[in-house]
Image (tube, coloured by chain):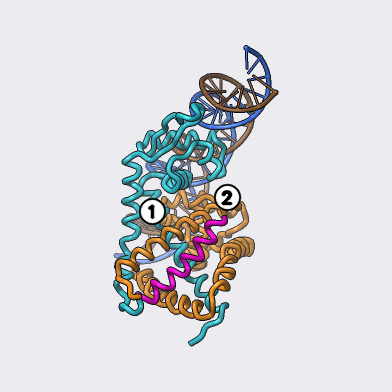
Chain colours: A cyan, B orange, C blue, D brown
Amino acid sequence: MPCTTDELIETLQEWVALFMRRSMHNVLSFAKEHNLSMSQMGALMNIHRHGMCNVSTIGDELGVTSAAASQMLERLVQQGVIERTEDPNDRRAKQIALTEKGRQMIHDGFRARYAWLGELAASFTPDEQDLIQTALRLLLGKMQQVDGRQ
Amino acid sequence: MPCTTDELIETLQEWVALFMRRSMHNVLSFAKEHNLSMSQMGALMNIHRHGMCNVSTIGDELGVTSAAASQMLERLVQQGVIERTEDPNDRRAKQIALTEKGRQMIHDGFRARYAWLGELAASFTPDEQDLIQTALRLLLGKMQQVDGRQ
DNA sequence: CTTTATATTTAAGCCGAGTTAAATATCGGG
DNA sequence: CCCGATATTTAACTCGGCTTAAATATAAAG
């Protein structure tokens, strides 16, 4: 049965809607579980993705002033999930990095969120698994392209 | 090329990681754009999904007291995106519903977030589109099952 | 060396989100 | 009708996030 582009768009929308809701739920429960604000979540994700960051970069990415970022990061330092060290190349700046505790927290969080994927994958026949694998690889390729130019 | 369940799990994980980031970004920019807190976003999504809600149900779903929900909804009423009406079947309770303005706001938000899906869908060949359509329908079916029993 | 720009922090204040406790109104069973 | 349960609101308070403005320290340019 052939499908039109419009049908595919509709399917993608359903898929995205379902996923968005799940992701949001995941993110919110993780935040609540660890007493983190959305800004703090965003900051941790940035640090997790980019490695070391400085304070104003984090502020910029969150769309807040560096004063706000500084205060919010201070609370993360007190919780022991990040650490601030002086940038050896520019002693005005601080380097923000995850502590071992912070890294562990994020890692465990991802693992917990991924647990259900195993069940999902196993519920398909080998043929279906192949089909889905191929389709998702196609999608991932294109999406990473789009992601890259943003 | 055959694939193992583990490979599929890995692909799904990549997908979820990519998606979680995008969703979070989408949600945060929508919230910022409309001056909404995460609780308010959650409340609006609940109302959007389930139609009418009462105050304490929304509080329960957000994991806050009904007092907190009441105050937060009051701010949404003042912003004109929801309205409270007396429940005709139980005059203690209020029915919370989106106003036309609120419905429009959410609709426009979804549309904007979905715009790129058109581009994405069109970038595949008809054969690829068929493949992706079939795969996503398989996934959607299983995921909605899982969603239903939660 | 002096001046200006940059990176961060601190202080003061506003505001929203959350809490508990109390008030109000209504429902429902006996 | 009365009483305990339920739904919502209000009040008083705490806390965190945000802002602006000022302070501090360092870098970089002239």
Would residue B13 be found to the left or right of residue D18 on screen?
left
Q: Inspect the image, locate mark 1, and give the three-letter code of the amino acid beneath it.
A: Ser
Residue located at (52% from left, 50% from top)? B37
Q: Position of residue B146 (x, y in %)?
A: 35, 70
For marks 2 and 1, give the CA distance. 20 Å
Residue located at (39% from left, 74% from top)? A132
Tell me which chain the residue with mark 2 is part of.
Answer: B
Q: Is residue B125 above or below residue D2?
A: below
> In terms of image quadrants, where is residue B61?
bottom left
Examine the rendering and report whether any part of residue A68 can be seen.
yes
Residue under pointer 1: A29
Please state, as top left, top right, bottom left or bottom right, where the C terminus of chain A lies in the image.
Answer: bottom right
Q: Inspect the image, locate mark 2, and give the three-letter code of the amino acid beneath it.
A: Lys
Residue under pointer 2: B32
Q: Position of residue A78 (x, y in %)?
A: 38, 33
10 Å crowding of disc 1: few (<14), some (14-19), many (20+): some
10 Å crowding of disc 2: few (<14), some (14-19), many (20+): few
Q: Where does the magenta region start and end?
A: A130-150
Front residue (pair B108, B48):
B108
Examine the rendering and report whether any part of residue B91 can be seen.
no
